[in-house]
Amino acid sequence: MLLKQGSKGSKVKELQKALGLSADGIFGGGTKLAVMKFQSKNGLDADGIVGPSTWEVIGIDTDQESAAEETEYTTKDGLVIDREYLDKDEYVRDYGKIEPLGFFIHHTAGWDNPYNTINNWNRDTRGRVATQYCIGGTNVKGKDAPNDGVVVECFPNNYLGWHLGKVGKFAISKFSGGVELNNFGYLKKKDGKYYTYVNTEVKPEYVCDLGYKFRGHQYWHAYSNKQIESLRLLILHLKDIYPKMDLVNGLPKLLKEGVHPKDAFEFNEDAYNAKQFGLWTHTNVRKDKFDCFPQPELVEMLKNI
């Protein structure tokens, strides 16, 4: 396996650990410099590219990897999905493989990097709380966000994570999949500036003004065009890998019927009580949550999916 600057995923993370670096799964300039130093120290061509010779000296055998272990794959619609699996005790395997019947969209209420999100899930003490996918977003400070729109698969198909919390029916979390969008959620406006819930100032270009209040908030950290397009392609992919998953009912159906987005994204009794599986957001089953909000671009994508 060949790794170079720009590569992402679990093998980059393995490489970084071997070099004593912070393992974020992103082959950036710092990783390249560390590789070049390692290569120079060990009499290798110091080009910063990790090929067979460098892997051999590091002591990691990549020859035995099967196709199933490849770090990324491309869907038939052209979406590249990276595999960065959680530790096995961070998602649910107790029930054997389960084919989900519905799907929920979440956002992380945090920064832009999906690999950091996954690392945080591995380190937290909440147990097996995770979604199968995470999609990188924009940096509210205006810094480079190389993972904007990057889709990461966090555990294998037909397993699950407890992604909804306490809801009306146990079956909802057990028989539904989910995705997290890297996004801070609602914002507060003060003296003409916008701030996250942790008081980080947000550049105006990353602000969505709904023009009305949803769950008490008018201003939100906007989902990026890349995130929304990646989500669209992911939903198309879900139709292929989970043929029993209902991606027609829920939000797409309500929005197509002309229900106002503010109401469509609100708490829904049928969703809460598992009377209707479909494509929903966390707000549809929890009155205390803010993920996701009805950004117009997201609404249009769901109406036309």
Image (cartoon, rainbow, N blue to C red):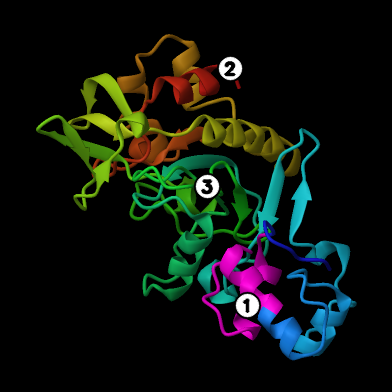
Judging from the image, what secondary structure is the residue with disc 2 in?
A: loop
Q: Amino acid at mark 3?
A: Gly
What is the CA distance from the residue labelled 1 to the residue labelled 3? 36 Å
Q: Name the image quarter holding residue 218.
A: top left
Instruction: Say if 282 sits above or below 225 in the image.
Output: below
- Of the 4 image quadrants, the one containing the N terminus is bottom right
Which residue range is magenta in the image?
8-36
Q: Which residue is mark 3?
A: 178
Query: Disc 1 marks which residue?
Result: 34
Q: Is residue 219 visible?
A: yes
Distance, label 2 to label 1, CA atoms, is: 46 Å
Which is more N-terminal, label 1 or label 2?
1
Q: Mark 1 and mark 2 in contact (Cβ < 8 Å)? A: no
Figure quadrant of residue 141: top left
Left or right: residue 10 versus residue 217 is right
Residue type highlighted by circle 2: Asn
Residue at x 51% of width, y 55% of height: 114
Pointer 1 local density, CA inside 10 Å: few below 14, some 14–19, many at least 20: some
Coordinates of residue 100 in the picture (x, y in percent): 61, 47
